[in-house]
Amino acid sequence: MREQPKNNIAHDAVKAWRITASIYMGGLFLLIIVGAVLSYIFEITYLYVGIAIVIWVLFLFVFVHLIPKLRYRRWRYEIFEQEVYIQHGILVVTRTIIPMIRVQHVDTEQGPILKRYKLATVSISTAATTHEIPALDEEDASTIRDRISVLARVDEDDV
Amino acid sequence: MCNTEETSLLEQFKQPRRLHPAAMYFDLIRVIKETIFGFGIGLILTLKESLFYFIIFASVFLILLIISSVLSWLRFTYRIEDNELRIEQGIFVRKKRYISLNRIHKIDLSANVVHRIIKLVKVQIDTASSGGGAEVSLSAIKVEEGERLRRALKKRENDFVIDEEKSEKTIPTEKISWSRLFIAGTTSGSVGIILFALLAGFTQIEELIPKRIYNSAYTWVIGQSVVILIGLIIFILLLLWIVGIAGTMIKYGNFIIEKREKELFIRRGLLETKELTIPFERIQAIGIQQSPIRQPMKFVQVFAVVAGGSFDKMEPFPVLFPLIHEREVDKFLQEFLPEFDQLETELIPLSKRSLKFYLFKSSILFILALLATAYFFPSFIWISLILLGLSLWYGWLQFKDGGYAIDGKRFTLQRRVFNKVTVTTYHRRIQSLKKRQHKIQALQKLATIEISLIGLGGLGTHYSLKHLEEKDANKVADWYSYRKTSKNTDLLDPLE
């Protein structure tokens, strides 16, 4: 765990994450509009709505612009014959080793946003944990899934 | 001889049998237990509207319940036929469940207070595949019949059972003495937990108590002298302490652990007898736990991390022995679980640099509290100071107790969150390994490691050791990683 894993995830991940974050921000914006309408009807000062908009803009910058970029930069994975090695986390960097012989099953998943960019998420389950590699190219994801499931077929050995 | 006895045993169960009529009662109680919460809410909601309708509704519901209990008792039968345990049940939808005797993995008999009074047992039958909960549960049958059923179902292992009976004297067994149990109760620390639960509960209940009663009680308390109040508090604490002792006595009374051929067998409980069998191959790790109250007396509790299944949800990891002296642990493990002995080996301690992280984390809340009290209630500042001192001391303990050891395929980790916990496991039991590091840790060349073991219900059990020397974290990772050869050749750490 000295070197970081070699492979980056697909660069379009940033776009996909930005869209997801934008949807949430859109929801928040609707709430602010509701707030503004209520302030108008009940003749409350617009101060609170103003504060909310400032916070919203700040959030927009952090969650839509900054975090997807940083997250992409940190996300790395590498698949060895004996184990899967993953790195993620913006403030707290987490590196995980999952030995192939502990892998129970591998899934790929694709939501509508990931589908638009031809991306898919691979999730690797052991008997105790589930680990995800988000947003890989579709083909990469299925090759990786097949590869892991072949490598994971190794019998319980002398460990 | 053996064979005829066997067949006659199976013959006995050939005809479909019903459970003891008390099963109706248990069924009723079970359903009521499951719905009582909803009813409580219903009661509170409808009480203001009309108590009358609620009572009508509740009684109709109860009558339906009773009818359904009776019918399901009538429909529920079990028998042994063609080497299968056959269960038929269901009022409208008839369900049949056939379980091949070969597949039966575990048969547990248990009895609660009601069972004991009318001399009944509950039989729970599990197959190897089942994840959580018993595959088949016979809620009430006569004790002798339960024993016979167990023997009939276990017939496959008959030869082995006879062997076991022959060598019965040599089966290692360990009981807990009453004096130990008493110590366990007095140091259970349940005072704190109960007090906390009461406080938490009280804030909820407060709203339900009529204002007038609450106010008059409040003024009464305020009106008393300090001496009486302190006396009252001491009295309540004493009472809680006794409740704690009684609770431990009831829970762990008659505790016995037996080592059998392929499993550990535990039976315990003063009022409600519970039994548990733990197959050796399901044991993922062994741990010992020591609460701060027990630390000066050097008493610990031994537990096992088991894949799937314990006594109940409140106790995710079965206790293998409720109270044992530190120096007896090794003997106990050698006898029952030799592959996990020497649990308290020499540990590699944490780096001195990690002390500040522990001190900061344990005391930060209390430092803030100190500032707040200094500003708002300067006269109570001594309380905050004491708490701050305690928290710093605790941080120091957490630092001092953290450590790990690698011995061949064996991995031992010790850490303190509140209690001091030492767990030991094997390479093949660790499902994945994490190394975590934030910016400040990276600057200080420290890292957190976390191992994941199989725990209850597929969720996994995770043990982490915080602020380990980064070099040590990498050592653990190298030990865990399977691609050692490549690492040793091209990724050698220049520091080493």
Image (cartoon, grey):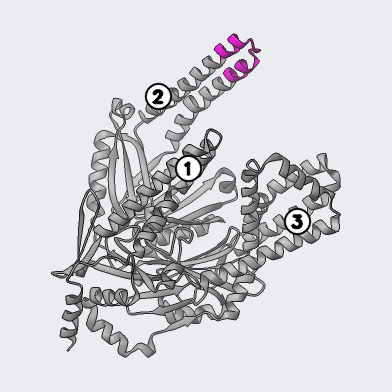
Could you tell whether B334 is left or right of B351 in the image?
Answer: left
Residue A139 in picture, x, y percent from top left: 24, 35
Report the residue at 26% width, 44% height from top. A145
Secondary structure mostly seen in magenta is helix
Question: How far apart are labels 2 and 3 at the CA level?
Answer: 49 Å
Question: How far apart are labels 1 and 3 at the CA level?
Answer: 56 Å
- Determine which quarter of the picture holds residue B232: bottom right
Q: Is residue B411 above or below residue B209?
A: below
Determine the chain carrying the residue at label 2: A
Residue that label 2 marks: A19
Q: Nearer the viewer, residue B476 or A98?
A: A98
Q: Is residue B179 above or below residue B365?
A: below
Residue A138 in picture, x, y percent from top left: 26, 34
Report the residue at 58% width, 9% height from top. A41
Residue B40 in picture, x, y percent from top left: 51, 44
Closer to viewer: mark 1 or mark 2: 1
Question: How far apart are labels 1 and 2 at the CA level?
Answer: 54 Å
Q: Nearer the viewer, residue B226 or B15?
A: B15
The range drawn in magenta is: A36-54
How many C-alpha atoms fall within 10 Å of the one at disc 1: few (<14), some, or many (≥20)? few
Q: Determine which of the numbered discs, if any, sits on residue B55 in the image.
A: 1
Closer to viewer: mark 1 or mark 3: 1
How many C-alpha atoms fall within 10 Å of the one at disc 3: few (<14), some, or many (≥20)? some
Residue B347 in picture, x, y percent from top left: 55, 69
Circle nearer the N terminus (1, 3): 1
Could you tell whether B370 is left or right of A3 in the image?
Answer: right
Could you tell whether B242 is left or right of B102 in the image?
Answer: right
- Secondary structure under tag 3 reads helix
Residue that label 3 marks: B389
Residue B245 visible (yes or no): yes
Pointers 2 and 3 in contact (C-beta within 8 Å): no
